[in-house]
Image: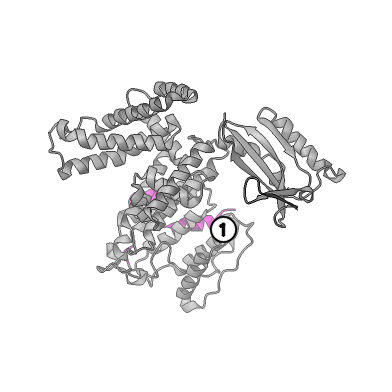
Amino acid sequence: MPLYAAFTFTPDLDWTAPEQSATMAEYGRFGEDHGHQIRGGQVLFPSSTATVVRVKGGRGGDVVTSDGPYAETKEVLSGFYLLECADLDEAVKVASEIPATWDGAVEVRPVIPL
Amino acid sequence: MTDRWRPPSTPSVAVRLDDVVRIEGGRILAVLAATTGDLQLAEDSVQDAAITALEVWPQTGVPTDPSAWLYVAARRKALDVLRRDSNRPRHEQRSTTLAGQLQRDPPPDSRIRDDVLRLIFTCCHPSLDLEHRVALALRTLCGLSTAEVARALLVSEATMAKRLVRTKQKIVRAAIPYGIPGDEELPGRIAAVCAVVHLVYTAGHHATGAEVVRTDLCDEGLRLVGLVDELLPGDAMVEALLALLLLTDARRPARLEADGSLVPLPEQDRSLWDRSKIDRGVALLNRSLARSGNVADPYQLQAAIAACHSTAESHASTDWPEIVRLYGILADVHPNPVVDLNAAIAIGEVDGGRCPRPARTSRSARTFAPVARRARRDAASDGRPAGGSGGVRGRRGCGADGAGTSPPRRSAAGMRRAR
């Protein structure tokens, strides 16, 4: 069965904060409802904790790190699921129940089978 | 005709084969695509089979059942490719399964019809870019060559070839299913199909290239909507789209001067309009409205506007207030600048432009009836439904079959009363 990555794009929030507990409970419910399709996934700390790494000039070049996401955007990558579904229609259906779709978006991408 | 020998390159063989490949090829393609899940493979196989037929038929004569012959040949090609690919273990299993599924004989008609419907839903899947859907529909559902699709959509052949490959790749990689959507998703998916078919037609009706009308694309649009209507009988949106395209297309013979330039609606010779298309369109529109409980979608509204024009005796006697009213509703349901422009033109036709412009209702008032209630006093918008630029002169000719062919105004009245 095809594997899909479902990336959640949401407001840039601290999901460990107590005021997010209601939303996290919704994610918990989603996880229970779709445990048979979820093959993995994680939630991320806010984008302010991110480090961007580049190597200038390709392999062996200078490692350049900078902070944060590339640009100020309303929605940031905040987590992902790996979903095993029969086809895209099923994956979209599951993704549509991820709470991130309510105030953000979920990008569903097929995973290359290796 | 079937067993007669035909010399290699006589036009008759080419035409016959062309017919068979165009009509049957699409069906065979649908079966192979649904069975293998690989549109590219299906396409290549059907194309190979067509080429083989062109080589063989001149020697053997056109077979008694050309489509069965083509199916068997295409199936063989598909199996060849699958076996060639089977050096990888995953593929071996796949090709064995597929070989079993690809029946020796062409599948029964009911199965073919379902597969064609599956292919339509796949090619018009909302996760594909709309323009790419149109290109893919022309290539696979209409059987146009890549070069023809490129010409139709005004891009280079190389660009189109790349676009088609990428689109087909997405179907495979993202596992877009060859399936008929469940009841829950069906309305949205039918809307996606209608959008593609409508674009195919309008690409021909308002062509942007050297020709102002691309007859071939108009015909493909009509053929596609007819096919969808046949496969999904009784769907209000599909019927409305079919009505819209018929009512629009009825005017096609009067739209062009001998030199290929467009004739504005007021100057068109209405006796050239195709009465049978108008009658069918009006009947379908009324049936569609009855089905949707008088809650009109944009296709129904556009079809109703087209019907007002098509059933008017002349440009002057056109029911402009009704057209303005319909544009007012359309602007609420489906706001866009073209609608506003057309509405403005129609308002100009009403009472020398003294008629007030309809006020917009909120977008939440999406249903036809509540909007319609404020109706009559609203005035008019323009009437260039699908294509003309103004007026009309013509016979009133609605009604081939009594029941369903009353002019649309009656339905509109019904819509006003509803709720």
What's the chain of the residue with tag 1? B
The structure residue drawn at horizontal position 27% and vertical position 63%, both measured from the top left corner, is B272
What's under tag 1, amino acid-wise? Val
Residue B123, horizontal then vertical, whole percent: 46, 43
Q: Quadrant of residue A34?
A: top right
Q: Residue at x 26, y 38 (%)?
A: B20
Q: Position of residue B398 (x, y in %)?
A: 35, 56
Q: Residues within 10 Å of mark 1 (few under 14, many from 20)?
A: many
**Residue B399 visible to the viewer:** no
Left or right for B330, reference B386? right
Residue B288 vertical position relative to residue B33 in the rendered view, above or below:
below
Percent of width and height locating residue B357: 55, 72
Quadrant that contains the N terminus of chain B: top left
- Between residues B167 and B341, which one lies in front from this camera angle? B167
Please say whether residue B403 is one of the residues in the magenta stretch.
Answer: yes
Horizontal and vertical percent for residue B255?
32, 65
Q: Secondary structure at mark 1?
A: helix
Q: Please name the residue that numbered disc 1 is placed on.
A: B333
Can residue B338 be seen from the camera position used here? yes
Numbered disc total:
1
Residue range in magenta is B394-419
Left/right placement of residue B304 relative to residue B374 reads left
